[in-house]
Amino acid sequence: GPGAGPAPPDGILARALQAAATAAARARADMTADTAAGGCAHTAASAAYRPPPRLKEYIAARDLTCRFLRCRQPAWRGDLDHTIPYDDGGRTCRCNLGGLCRTHHLLKHHSDWKLRQIAPGIFAWTTPAGRTYTTTPDIHAV
């Protein structure tokens, strides 16, 4: 149709389709493991403080933007924050990581604001006044 470019070379298309199929299979396996565990099965968890590239990319794709209330900074540009600090036993896992812009990452660590991750990608911010607001991952445009 109008605006459509030339078809990609067969090798590129085949690799793209294979990557999509692999990602979908991994997502199905993770969902099955999470269901069996009754929550996050930590299938993508890392023992290291810094998340491996695949986990970092997953969080950026899941969150899309900073998880603070109405902040629109892209998640890939910000920090990957351990909701429960790593030094306090927080896992480097999708259930304990969230994308925060630098401003809101500092706010979380240096103020009376509190942050909990209720489920992977669902965050509850509690204000210094004690009010709690929940944020969920942004919707991907189709």
Image (cartoon, helix red, strand yellow):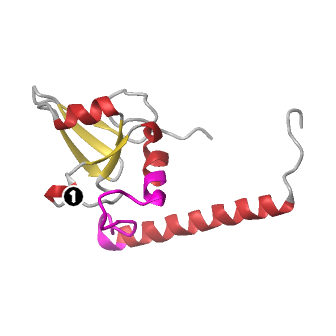
Q: Amino acid type of disc 1?
A: Gly
Rendering coords of residue 111 (x, y %): 13, 31
Q: Which residues are magenta?
A: 36-57
Q: How many marks?
A: 1
Mark 1 lies on residue: 90
Figure check: 47 above or below 4: below
Badge 1 element: loop
Left or right of 37? Residue 128 is left
Rendering coords of residue 64 (x, y %): 47, 40
Tell me, yes or no, whether the highlighted magenta stretch contains residue 44: yes
Q: Residue at x 43, y 58 (%)?
A: 55
Of residues 51 and 23, which is closer to you in this image?
A: 51
Q: Quadrant of the N terminus?
A: top right
Rendering coords of residue 82 (x, y %): 27, 50
Tell me, yes or no, whether the highlighted magenta stretch contains residue 63: no
Q: Main secondary structure of the magenta part?
A: loop
Rendering coords of residue 122 (x, y %): 32, 45
Quarter of the image where one finds residue 39: bottom left
